[in-house]
Image: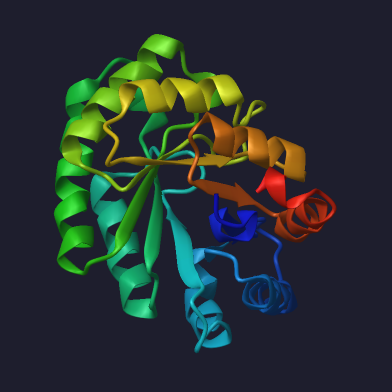
């Protein structure tokens, strides 16, 4: 297994975040060689400047955090984020449509946004807020997004009462094609939890505790990587 730092999307998405918070986040991501930073859309340009020359990617969120904005609004956000330099788009699915069983709306949304992201060779992660969904709803999401060919299915925004769980990641892995990766996020604050998510099938970890996780990993033996 590769070092755990290469799994981490170092994240800050609170509405009160400052320029200094973004600068610190990016400096840490470069120092620890994280996979990406995940920042609010209005900070994509700044993040892109701060990680320049490194292998760190810039991710941002679309339709965040509730996902019920119109597809046209999400498309506008995606285009602006790409223009600003985003490499990866973490798009919140329409959770209300999922809870209402409106699978046509879910399929239509991904079918509209995916070609735009693909045309620019960007990565798309779809967030389904698994903590508020039933297993049946999660499986239906896996079926639709797996068939669409997204890059990652992501567990949570971090705004629901329940974030990522090992059981949910395992359910994702069971029902997704191997080509679709899993991003576990929401409530992952230490090395042990992050490792459990990876063992369950996650290939990205979204968290604000990346430094603490890496520090925890450094306190374990090499066999834990």
The x and y percentages for residue 207 are 65, 50
In this picture the colour scheme is rainbow
Q: Nearer the viewer, residue 69 or 18?
A: 18
Position of residue 94 relative to residue 141, above or below, is: below
Q: How many marks?
A: 0
Q: Is residue 192 left or right of residue 135?
A: right
The x and y percentages for residue 132 are 53, 21
Position of residue 52 relative to residue 174, above or below, is: below
Position of residue 141 relative to residue 123, above or below, is: above
Q: Nearer the viewer, residue 208 or 180?
A: 180
Q: Nearer the viewer, residue 128 or 214?
A: 214
Q: Is residue 13 visible from the viewing direction of this image?
A: no
The x and y percentages for residue 131 are 56, 23
Q: Is residue 172 left or right of residue 7?
A: left
Which residue corresponds to the image point at 21% horizontal and 69% vertical from the top-left? Answer: 120
| Residue 25, image quadrant | bottom right
Which residue corresponds to the image point at 57% horizontal and 34% vertical from the top-left? Answer: 199
The x and y percentages for residue 106 are 24, 31
Q: Spot the residue most to the right.
A: 219
Position of residue 64 relative to residue 52, above or below, is: above
Q: Is residue 169 left or right of residue 100?
A: right
Q: Is residue 165 visible from the viewing direction of this image?
A: yes
| Residue 149, image quadrant | top left
Which residue corresponds to the image point at 23% horizontal and 67% vertical from the top-left? Answer: 121
């Amino acid at each position: 297994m590769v070092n755990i730092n290469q799994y981490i999307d170092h994240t800050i998405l609170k509405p009160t975040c400052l320029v200094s918070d973004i600068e610190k986040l990016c400096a840490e991501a470069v120092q620890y060689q994280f996979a990406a930073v995940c920042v609010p859309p209005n900070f994509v340009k700044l993040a892109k400047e701060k990680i320049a020359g490194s292998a760190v990617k810039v991710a941002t969120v679309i339709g965040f955090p509730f996902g019920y904005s119109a597809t046209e609004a999400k498309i506008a956000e995606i285009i602006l984020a790409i223009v600003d330099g985003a490499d990866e788009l973490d798009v919140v699915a329409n959770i209300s449509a999922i809870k209402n069983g409106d699978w046509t709306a879910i399929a239509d949304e991904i079918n509209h946004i995916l070609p735009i992201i693909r045309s620019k060779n960007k990565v798309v992660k779809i967030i389904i807020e698994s903590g508020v969904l039933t297993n049946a709803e999660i499986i239906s999401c896996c079926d639709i997004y797996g068939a669409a060919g997204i890059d990652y299915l992501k567990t949570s925004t971090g705004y629901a009462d329940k974030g990522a769980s090992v059981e949910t990641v395992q359910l994702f892995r069971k029902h997704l094609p191997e080509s679709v990766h899993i991003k576990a996020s929401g409530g992952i604050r230490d090395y042990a939890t992050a490792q459990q998510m990876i063992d369950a099938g996650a290939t990205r970890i979204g968290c604000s505790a990346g430094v603490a996780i890496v520090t925890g990993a450094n306190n374990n033996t090499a066999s834990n990587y």
